[in-house]
Image: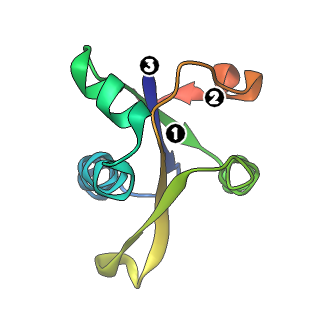
Amino acid sequence: MKMYILIRESVPLGNAIVAAAHASIAAYLRFRDAPEMAEWLSGPFRKVVCRVTDEELERARSVPDHVVLTESALGGAEVAIAFKPRAEWDKAFQFLRLYR
């Protein structure tokens, strides 16, 4: 089970770190009653954080069960999207760049 968190590449590093932390808890709060969340929490609760282009972020919106994060310090801009944990992911997620 993995949770993917996608962060827009234009977000400054400091805001990106905060967005990743907020995304993880926001996904937990949104999906806390889902059986996938319980399974994820019982394991190593893996998270994959990727740095994405605007286009990649928009395409990811078509994947169900996500929460979009905004940042007030950046004028309410959408900065990240976090997904409910799952065992199987769309192949496109394998090609996203890890945030390093």
Residue at numbered disc 3: 1
Going 25% across and 14% down the picture, which residue do you hit? 44
Q: Say left or right for 96 vs 83.
A: right
Going 28% across and 56% down the picture, which residue do you hit? 29
Mark 3 lies on a secondary structure that is: loop
Q: Say left or right for 56 vs 27.
A: right
Locate the C terminus by quadrant.
Answer: top left
Query: Which tag, 1 or 3, sits closer to the chain's start?
Result: 3
Going 59% across and 43% down the picture, which residue do you hit? 52
From this viewpoint, is residue 4 visible? yes
Locate the N terminus by quadrant.
Answer: top left
Residue at numbered disc 1: 51
Query: Which tag, 3 or 2, sits closer to the chain's start?
Result: 3
| Cα distance between the residues tagged 1 and 2 | 7 Å
Residue 49 x/y as whole percent:
42, 33
Residue at numbered disc 2: 96
